[in-house]
Image (cartoon, rainbow, N blue to C red):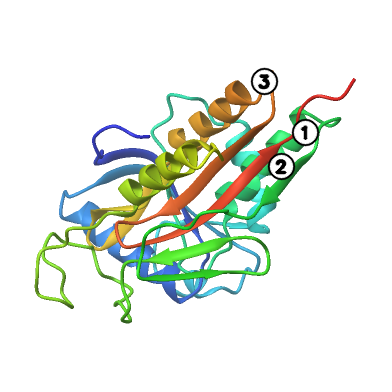
Amino acid sequence: MSGPEASDYGTIVIVGGGCYGSYYVRQLGRAREAGAISFEKLLVVDHSAECAVAEIESDAGIVIAEWTDFFDDYLGSAPEDNRDAIVPSPLMPHLMYQWLRGRARSRWPQRVVETRALTLEPDTPWKSAAPDGTFYASFATWTCPINCVEPRVCPHTRGERTWTMPSAAVELVERSAAAGEPLQGPVIFHCSHRAFGVGMFDTRDVVAADRLVQRVAADSAANVLVGTVSHCHGAFNVLHVGAETS
């Protein structure tokens, strides 16, 4: 949903202050020193004041909060034209979907708002449905290094990377429509490499996604495909908003 990737940011929010978060803080500091990226503020969100980021030298601010509580406040007040970005954790739940679902429940308290299972699956070689309704998909059947930037030539296969998960999501929406089970969207938060091995997606995309849900479900029931993805991996949910009841 975003335009060209930027290199100048307002606030960059890092989800989690553990081993991944501390790596991202160090890399972003190095990237800024090298002139590869600029930002006004770096925030790390963790439930513990004793997280790994607190042990390293950096100018990152640490917000002690549960992730869902933080994003309720942060995203709920973010303007549409902000210059912020979010660095997800590989181990986090599908937080952006959870936020969209919570917003829909607040907006339409008299309507059914719930997670629905995918009736069709992304066309990927690896896939798995989690108990909470999140569907995970990957083009990799091998273990990828955590700092892979998903270059055009795959480091594992040594061949051209011909796949990208955002396109797989679009194709899933098209197949669902052809099968008579239409999905709105897809709403895609594409975590892409920005600098020195750090991937992120733009906060404005999450704000725009909330506006999309509000628009497509304003007058009728809707099922919206929501995915947080990289080129190779993705987490998907279907957000169902039921019809208005009299």
The disc placed on residue 85 is none
Residue in front for this viewpoint, 129 or 147:
129
Q: Give x and y (percent) for residue 121.
A: 48, 58
Q: Is residue 96 visible?
A: yes
* Residue bearing mark 2: 102
SS for tag 2?
helix
Residue in front for this viewpoint, 125 or 49:
125
In the displayed structure, would residue 54 be above or below residue 37? below
**Residue occupying the point 62% across, 25% down:** 214
Kind of residue indicated by mark 1? Ser
Residue in front for this viewpoint, 94 or 172:
172
- Which of discs 1 and 3 lies nearer the camera? The answer is 3
**Residue occupying the point 65% across, 26% down:** 217
In the displayed structure, would residue 104 be above or below residue 18? above
Residue in front for this viewpoint, 67 or 97:
97
Name the image quarter holding the N terminus. top left
* Residue bearing mark 3: 218
Q: Name which quarter of the figure residue 210 lies in.
A: top right
Q: Tell whether 16 sits left or right of 9.
A: right
**Residue occupying the point 48% across, 25% down:** 80
Kind of residue indicated by mark 3? Ala
Q: What crowding class fits label 1: few (fewer than 14 Cα within 10 Å), some (14-19), or many (20 or more)?
A: few
Q: Which of the marked residues, 2 or 3, is nearer the chain's N terminus?
A: 2
* Residue bearing mark 1: 106
Name the image quarter holding the C terminus. top right
Q: CA distance from mark 1 to mark 3?
A: 13 Å
Q: Give x and y (percent) for residue 91.
A: 51, 70
Q: Give x and y (percent) for residue 93.
A: 58, 62
Kind of residue indicated by mark 2? Gly
Q: Tell whether 121 sits left or right of 29.
A: right
